[in-house]
């Protein structure tokens, strides 16, 4: 049996391929790739201000260093346009392999860069360039992995299986944190000369391992059926923006929920270890690592719940809950009480935020048909993530010259979370829509002829 040549729709049951293998490949690949991505965040908060920028102006150095963290997010929309197009034209697996190699190589090269003391202003320029390559890679990683798992998954468990992409992302952050903990504990002289390079150089192993794993993964039945039946979109982006622009906008707004992650992982880390609070670097890294460990358990549980009651209720609980918990967490940091910080961090990021974080892979992917699914997820999420990436820079400005206005940062993060909740509340509930009909019902295509007409370029 083959897919319809115009819609790329697979026959009933064809979308269910090898869900466990696809989920594992998505999990391990995301973990390895986001290990690379997250070690940059830790270094930007703890090391780079003294390594790549003028040490005579520490406040400005910290601000610029945090801004370089956001540079990757600025590059992501461009990467989403390019990788989304080729992912819907050439297949999900090829993009998954390519993005992992690019991420591993650019991260390895960061570990080889000269410092500000060695090369002057060329050092931060090269650092930003490598960060751009990281952003281009990340733009296609989650979208391709999400499309792969969603299209292989059983229809009644799409939320659960696609959550492994984000579960792998959390594992990558744990790995990055665990690697950085002993590095951050080094004496300053060793940390700022050679110690900080170790996590980045280890990415060579990451790239090789990920390449081997993903090369063995089969393309999804949905894409194979579409390619065989000549149902692959020739211009996915044109079709996406013509027929699905409203969903792209919705995903952009909902994807701003990533602001919670960047504030928790980067700005709060910088604030807690600053002179204003004085928590030890390794202690705060343990908070981040432990919260992500809790998220590893919480994400699939939230996802399974969404398969039962729907995507929207779970996502809304996570977004609105995060709007409240950010006040609790940043207040806890301001008190300097480590037990309070630890408990609040686990509840905030590990449990509450995971409700939204674990649902979006299925929720966003289910908005689009297979013909433009990777493009739709990539473009929508990466524009939203680009804004979220610079949330760290905005937070640093809101915090003021002393960096201690945590209440202003909490209000900023809460407002963003409410915007995300509004976007989700206005969307469709898709958890019971058959895989072959995802992205089609909203256009009123109730018959095969109507589907063909609405999908024709």
Image (cartoon, rainbow, N blue to C red):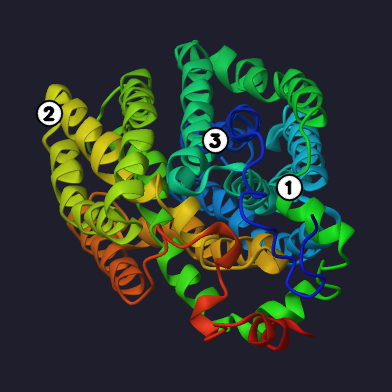
In the picture of the structure, the residue carrying the numbered disc 1 is: 221
- The alpha-carbon separation of the residues under discs 1 and 2 comes to 49 Å
Q: Which residue is mark 3?
A: 38
Inspect this view and state whether residue 27 appears. yes
Judged by depth in the image, the label closer to the viewer, 1 or 3, is 1
Q: Quadrant of residue 293?
A: top left
Percent coordinates x, y for residue 316 in the rendering: 26, 60
SS at badge 3:
helix
Say which of 215 and 74 sits in front. Answer: 215
Q: Mark 3 packing: few (<14 Cα in 10 Å), some, or many (20+)?
A: many
Quarter of the picture holding the N terminus: bottom right
* SS for dot 2: helix
Gap between marks 2 and 3, in whole Å?
A: 25 Å
Front residue (pair 423, 32): 423
Q: Position of residue 431 (x, y in %)?
A: 40, 57
Of circles 1 and 2, the one toward us is 1
Query: In the image, is residue 37 above or below residue 232?
Result: above
**Structural crowding at the residue carrying mark 2, measured as other residues with C-alpha within 10 Å and reported as few (<14), some (14–19) or many (≥20):** some
**Residue 370 placement, left or right of 281:** right
Q: In the rendering, at what x and y percent does residue 8 appear?
A: 75, 66
Name the residue beneath numbered marker 2. 340
| Residue at x 81% of width, y 51% of height | 224
Up the image or down, 55 lies above or below 413; here it is above
Residue at point 80% right, 58% down?
2
Q: Are marks 1 and 2 in contact (CB under 8 Å)?
A: no
Q: What label sits on residue 334 in the rendered view?
A: none
At horizontal 39% and vertical 28% (from top left) the residue drawn is: 296
Asked if one can make out residue 44 in the rendered structure from this viewpoint, the answer is: no
């Amino acid at each position: 049996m083959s897919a319809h040549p115009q819609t790329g729709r697979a026959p009933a049951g064809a979308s269910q391929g090898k869900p466990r293998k696809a989920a594992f490949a998505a999990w391990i690949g995301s973990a390895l790739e986001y290990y690379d991505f997250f070690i940059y965040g830790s270094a930007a908060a703890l090391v780079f201000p003294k390594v790549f920028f003028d040490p005579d102006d520490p406040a400005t150095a910290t601000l610029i260093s945090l801004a370089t963290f956001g540079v990757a997010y600025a590059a992501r929309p461009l990467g989403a346009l390019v990788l989304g197009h080729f992912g819907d034209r050439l297949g999900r697996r090829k993009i998954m392999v390519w993005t992992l190699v690019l991420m591993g190589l650019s991260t390895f090269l960061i570990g080889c860069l000269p410092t500000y003391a060695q090369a002057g202003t060329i050092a931060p320029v090269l650092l930003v360039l490598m960060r751009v390559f990281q952003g281009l890679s990340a733009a296609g990683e989650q979208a391709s992995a999400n499309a792969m798992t969603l299209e292989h998954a059983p229809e009644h468990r799409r939320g659960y299986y696609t959550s492994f992409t984000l579960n792998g992302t959390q594992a990558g952050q744990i790995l990055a944190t665990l690697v950085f903990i002993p590095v951050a504990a080094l004496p300053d002289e060793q940390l700022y000369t050679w110690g900080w390079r170790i996590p980045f150089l280890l990415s060579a192993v990451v790239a090789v391992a990920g390449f081997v794993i993903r090369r063995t993964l089969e393309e999804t039945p949905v894409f194979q059926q579409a390619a065989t039946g000549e149902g692959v979109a020739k211009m996915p982006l044109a079709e996406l923006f013509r027929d699905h622009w409203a969903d792209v906008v919705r995903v952009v707004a909902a994807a701003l929920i990533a602001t919670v992650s960047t504030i928790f992982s980067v700005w709060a880390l910088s604030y807690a270890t600053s002179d204003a609070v004085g928590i030890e670097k390794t202690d705060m890294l343990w908070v981040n690592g432990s919260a992500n460990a809790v998220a590893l358990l919480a994400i699939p549980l939230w996802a399974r719940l969404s398969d039962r009651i729907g995507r929207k209720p779970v996502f809304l609980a996570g977004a609105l809950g995060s709007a409240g918990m950010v006040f609790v967490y940043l207040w806890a940091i301001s008190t300097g009480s480590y037990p309070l910080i630890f408990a609040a961090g686990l509840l905030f990021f590990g449990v509450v935020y995971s409700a939204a974080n674990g649902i979006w892979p299925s929720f966003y992917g289910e908005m689009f048909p297979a013909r433009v699914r990777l493009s739709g997820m990539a473009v929508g999420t990466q524009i939203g993530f680009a804004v979220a990436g610079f949330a760290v820079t905005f937070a640093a400005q809101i915090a003021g010259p002393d960096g201690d206005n945590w209440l202003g940062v909490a209000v900023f993060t809460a407002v963003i979370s409410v915007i995300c909740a509004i976007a989700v509340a206005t969307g469709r509930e898709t958890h019971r829509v058959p895989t072959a009909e995802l992205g089609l019902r909203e256009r009123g295509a109730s018959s095969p002829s109507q589907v063909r007409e609405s999908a024709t370029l």
